[in-house]
Amino acid sequence: MPWSRNSKSDPPGSPSSPGQRPERPPGGFTVLVVDDEEAVRRLACRMLTWMGYQALEARHGREALATIEEHHGPIHLILTDIKMPGMNGRELGRQVESRWPDKAILYMSGFASEVFRGGLLEAGAPFIAKPFTQEDLSLKIRGMLE
């Protein structure tokens, strides 16, 4: 259960101690998955749904920006591939950071060494290497949101 912080009996949104992390909003956190590969995007969305998150999809950076603008309700985290045609994930991240500075961004790539050595992503930026397991994804997202 992704929401449990203390035990299996904790209700969603129960903080482990006062003032630590924000409570899970009613209906759960919403994550926007941005990847040009449909199979990867759909699998990530399925994993997120199984973990109790609401998942939205975008095929590329421009579609992601439109989704953020048009979605009724908050989007708490953006999970974006780095290498995509047109606007890459880092360019998307810069636009999101400037327009919606409160949104968390988690970058993903199957080419981790190339991403960091090539300067596409700064050291220490939130990152998960593809392929990832549901547990890996859960730990990363929980660490960023909950």
Image: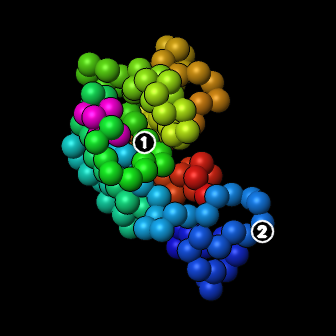
Residue 73, horizontal then vertical, whole percent? 38, 53
Q: Which residue is labeled 1 in the image?
A: 79
Residue 96's image quarter? top left
Q: Which residue is located at x 63 percent, y 24 percent?
A: 123
**Amino acid type for the residue under numbered disc 1:** Leu
Q: Which residue is located at x 33 percent, y 51 percent?
A: 72
Magenta residues, start to end: 63-68
Crowding at label 1, few (<14), some or many (≥20) Cα neighbours within 10 Å?
many
Crowding at label 2, few (<14), some or many (≥20) Cα neighbours within 10 Å?
few
Residue 62, horizontal then vertical, whole percent? 27, 27
Q: Nearer the viewer, residue 2 or 71?
A: 71
Residue 60's image quarter? top left
Which secondary structure class fits the magenta region best?
helix
Residue 65, horizontal then vertical, whole percent? 32, 32
Asked whether residue 3 is in view, the answer is: yes
Residue projecting furthest to the left = 38
Q: Which residue is located at x 41 percent, y 20 percent?
A: 91
Residue projecting furthest to the right = 18
**Numbered disc in front, either 1 or 2:** 2
Residue projecting furthest to the bottom = 9
Q: Which residue is labeled 2 in the image?
A: 17
Residue 21: in magenta span:
no
Up the image or down, 120 lies above or below 38; here it is above
**Amino acid type for the residue under numbered disc 2:** Ser
Asked whether residue 64 is in view, the answer is: no
Residue 65: in magenta span:
yes
